[in-house]
Each structure stands twice: as structure tokens, then as C-alpha cells.
Image (cartoon, rainbow, N blue to C red):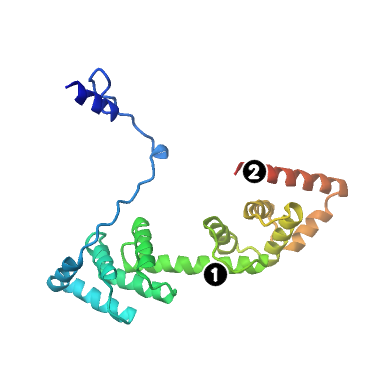
Amino acid sequence: MADALNFWADCGVLSVDGNAVPTVTVSPEEKPRTVRAAAVKPGREEVARRGIENEEIAFLLRQSEQKFGRALRQNEAATLVWLHDDEGMSVALILMLIEFAISEGKGNIGYIERTAVSWIDDGVEDISAAEQKINEIYKSRSCWSIVQKAFGIERRMPSKKEEEFALLWIGERKTDNELLTEAYNRCIDNTGKFSIPYIAKILDKWYKDGVKTVSDIKENAAKKKPDSIAAYDSTLFESMLSAIDND
């Protein structure tokens, strides 16, 4: 009996005197991120059985082979059946995802599964929501392309933060390309390196001040005395560096 009490005490269920440990309520902000359980996919025989007994599954597998242009491998067929049976994705949604992946040059089952899980977690449950999701991807890509060109940096995939800033600057605020370049140049001149947070703070300041073009910057500067401009720039520079260090 003592050993059992000690076991449950070690697990945090009982206190050392045998009484139940009070439940501690965790606020939403403190809740840990949900971790997905490892996928348990059907074996070869189960996949074959589902294809025989369920016409939807049979259609899914046939159409998938046509899109891939070859016979499905075991792990591919198992993943597709798992997405339908266990994750609740419709046949139409899975086929749309496969077509999208292939059009992106990523027609492999690993990418398809990761994207499917991402869509499920984001609440994408039908074709309409999937189309919206794909359009967001294309829009994000287009915005980042404009930012890359304005900054004159190498073509690459953006980080999540870079993607968010590109959508904000181009998709929402319609920031002028020359203004983007000016912010980039000031970042390099002041810090000696490329820093998205630094550029973001410059653009945020200009946006709040109603600055829309490089000409606006020059006009604003002309209204200030030389000594006040120097003090302003120095203060802005120091505050930006401090804010970036604390991010």
C-alpha cells in the first residue's frame, strides 16, 4: 500500500499523506502548445480492403495515380487513406492538395502530408477555404518578391516574420517601392547589416507620420533645423537599437 501511495505521489496525483493534490487551473496564455500524436497509418492490407469496400477511397487512389503519373507507393496510398479516414479530409480536398503540391514542384508525400496537417490545424475543411488558403500563399509570395526587389537581396524563401512584414507593407499598406529601398539603405548605413526589425521600425515611423514617398521625407526634413534633425536622427537610431535588442 505504501509503495502505491509513493508511486501516485511521485506522479503528482496524491500528496505524501494520501490526499488528492488540488487541481491547478492554467490560464489560456500558460497552456502548452498541443502536440500532435504520431500518425498511425493503415498497412498494405488495410489500404487494399478500404479501396475495395469504399468507392470514394478507390476513386481517391485512382485519381491520385493519374495526377502523379504513376502507381502509388505503399506509404503514399497509406497517407492518403489516413488523411481521409482519420483526419476527415474529403476526397476532393485531398486531390486539390495533390494538384497544388505538384504545381509547386513539390509532389512528394512528405510535403503533401505536412501541408494537409497545416490546413487541418488552420480549419481548412472545404474547397472554398482551400482556395482562399492557396490565394494567401500566392499573395504572400508576390508581396515578398516585391520586397526582395526593393531591397536588392538574393532570391530565397522568407522567414515567417519576413513574410508577415511583406504582407503588411505591400498587401495592406501599399508601401511605395522607393520608400522600401530608402528604409533598407538607412538600415545598412546605420547598422552595417540587413535587419528586418530595424527596417520595420523605420517604416512604421514613416507610416504613422503620413510619409508615403521619398519626397515626403525630404519635405519633412526641410522643415526642421539642421541641429534638430541631427538630434532627432540620433535619438531614433538609439531607440531602434534598444528596441531590437529587447525583441
The extreme right residue here reads 226
Distance of label 1 from label 2 (alpha carbons): 30 Å
- Residue found 34% across the figure and 64% down from its top: 113
- Is 10 positioned to the left or the right of 2 in the image? right
Judge the density around disc 2: few (<14), some (14-19), many (≥20) Cα neighbours within 10 Å: few
Q: Position of residue 70 (x, y in %)?
A: 30, 81
Query: In the picture, residue 57 is in which quadrant?
Result: bottom left
Of residues 107 and 178, which is closer to you in this image?
107
Query: In the picture, residue 150 is in which quadrant?
Result: bottom right
Query: In the picture, residue 46 is in which quadrant?
Result: bottom left
**Mark number, residue 125:** none
- Is 79 positioned to the left or the right of 186 in the image? left
Q: According to the image, label 1 marks what residue?
A: 142
Q: Give the residue type at disc 1.
A: Ser
Mark positioned earlier in the residue sequence (1 or 2): 1
Quadrant housing the N terminus: top left
Say if 156 sits above or below 192 in the image: below
Q: Position of residue 114 (x, y in %)?
A: 37, 62
Judge the density around disc 1: few (<14), some (14-19), many (≥20) Cα neighbours within 10 Å: some
Q: Nearer the viewer, mark 1 or mark 2?
A: 2
- Residue found 29% across the figure and 70% down from its top: 76
Say if 198 sits above or below 60 in the image: above
Q: According to the image, label 2 marks what residue?
A: 245
Quadrant housing the C terminus: top right
Q: Give the residue type at disc 2.
A: Asp
The extreme front residue here reads 3
Q: Position of residue 236 (x, y in %)?
A: 73, 46
Local secondary structure at mark 1: helix
- Residue found 74% across the figure and 62% down from its top: 214
